[in-house]
């Protein structure tokens, strides 16, 4: 969920929820968007995910 929130909100890193209640609230507010298969299967999301994961694991500083 933190992965998708960061992408949707245009962040460069994964989003960190404060607690489970915050995460559930955000899920409920964005339910339609989160279950949109065109978003989940998009090249843009996949490219963003690779960059963020590389930064997270120290393999790419860009």
Image (tube, helix red, strand yellow):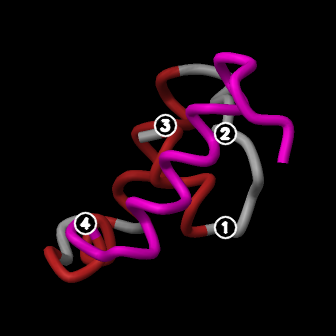
Camera-near label (4 vs 2) is 4
Of mark 4 and mark 3, the one earlier in the sequence is 3
**Residue most toward the right?**
61
Name above or below for residue 10 compared with residue 19. Answer: below
Name above or below for residue 60 compared with residue 5. Answer: above
Q: For the residues labelled 4 and 3, say whether their Cβ atoms are less than 8 Å apart.
A: no
Give the Cα separation between the discs numbered 1 and 4: 15 Å
Camera-near label (1 vs 4) is 4
At 21% across and 69% down in the image, what residue appears? 41
At 67% across and 67% down in the image, what residue appears? 9
Of mark 2 and mark 1, the one earlier in the sequence is 1
Q: Is residue 10 magenta?
A: no
Q: Residues within 10 Å of mark 1 (few under 14, many from 20)?
A: few
Of mark 1 and mark 4, the one earlier in the sequence is 1
Q: Is residue 58 magenta?
A: yes
Q: Which residue is mark 2?
A: 15
Residue range highlighted in magenta? 40-62
Q: Which mark is residue 47?
A: none
Q: Give the x, y percent position of residue 26.
A: 49, 52
Give the Cα separation between the discs numbered 1 and 3: 14 Å
Q: Which residue is mark 1?
A: 9
Give the Cα separation between the discs numbered 2 and 1: 9 Å
Q: Residues within 10 Å of mark 2 (few under 14, many from 20)?
A: some
Q: For the residues labelled 2 and 1, say whether their Cβ atoms are less than 8 Å apart.
A: yes
Q: Which mark is residue 23?
A: 3
């Amino acid at each position: 969920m933190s992965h998708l929130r960061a992408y949707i909100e245009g962040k460069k890193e994964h989003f960190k929820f404060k607690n489970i209640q915050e995460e559930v609230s955000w899920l409920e507010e964005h339910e339609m968007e989160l279950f949109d298969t065109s978003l989940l299967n998009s090249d843009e999301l996949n490219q963003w995910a690779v960059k963020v994961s590389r930064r997270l694991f120290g393999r790419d500083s860009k």
